[in-house]
Each structure stands twice: as structure tokens, then as C-alpha cells.
Image (spheres, helix red, strand yellow):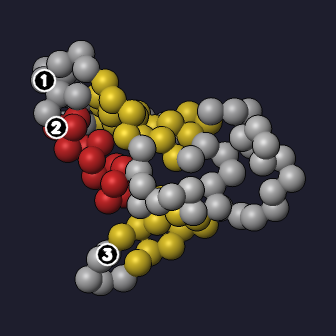
Amino acid sequence: MTSTGEAVPLWERVAPGSETWNQDERAWAIPSPLDLSTLWNVVQPTLTPVLPDPAVATGTGVVVVPGGAYIMLAIDHEGFDVAEWLAERGVAAFVLKY
């Protein structure tokens, strides 16, 4: 059984250099046949741990950086789905929202 922890902000407020941005972060689902969850306009980056069951933990950890070319993030398909797959195999994963 894997465990997804709380998202940890990388900065107290917004990321340096984005102080004047006024866009709102939003989620958007791309419908079938892709069925992807995406995030747009990320201003406050976070790191979310997805940890393996201690009984199978290998002591290895990786940062998972979902694709999206700084425009949008395929946060589930290329982020949390990958992290869950790794955690099921004993690898601690940390999903970066950027």
C-alpha cells in the first residue's frame, strides 16, 4: 500500500520571478480517448511525496517531473500515476508541480 503525503510548497508565497503574475492556477480534464488531468498556470510550485509501504521500501527515491513544456502539466498521467507505480515497487517518489 502506498501513501501520498501532503504537498509541500517550495516557497512561502509564489516562485521567485512570478510575483507580478496574475493568472489563477486551474485544472482542466482532457476528455476521452485521452482522459488526462492537466494543470495550467502554476504559480506556487510544490513537491508531493508518494511513499512505498515500509515492508517493500528499497531506500531509493526519485523526483517525478510531469511533462507539459511549462505551459501545462500532465499531473496525473505523467506525475502521480508514475509515482504510484514506483512506490508499488518500493521506490519513494516526489511529484513536482511547477
Residue tagged by mark 2? 88
Q: Can you say whether 31 is above or below 58 in the image?
A: below
Residue 64 placement, left or right of 98: left
Which element carries disc 2, helix, strand or loop?
helix
Residue 33 percent location from the top left of the image: 26, 83
Query: Residue visible at 52% across and 46% down?
Result: 97
Residue 53 percent location from the top left of the image: 20, 27
Residue 85 seen from this side? yes
Along the viewing direction, whichever of 70 and 14 lies nearer the viewer: 70
Which element carries disc 1, helix, strand or loop?
loop
Specify which label sits upstream in the sequence, 3 or 2: 3
Query: Residue visible at 13% across and 23% down?
Result: 56
Residue tagged by mark 1? 56
Which element carries disc 3, helix, strand or loop?
loop
Residue 47 percent location from the top left of the image: 50, 36
Query: Residue visible at 36% across and 82% down?
Result: 31
What's under tag 3, amino acid-wise? Answer: Asp
Residue with the most extreme right position: 20
Specify which label sits upstream in the sequence, 3 or 1: 3
Residue 85 placement, left or right of 48: left
Distance (Cα) linking label 3 and label 1 = 31 Å
Residue with the most extreme bottom position: 32
What's under tag 1, amino acid-wise? Answer: Val
Residue tagged by mark 3? 35
CB contact under 8 Å: marks 1 and 2: yes
Specify which label sits upstream in the sequence, 1 or 2: 1
CB contact under 8 Å: marks 3 and 1: no
Q: Can you say whether 38 is above or below 88 in the image?
A: below
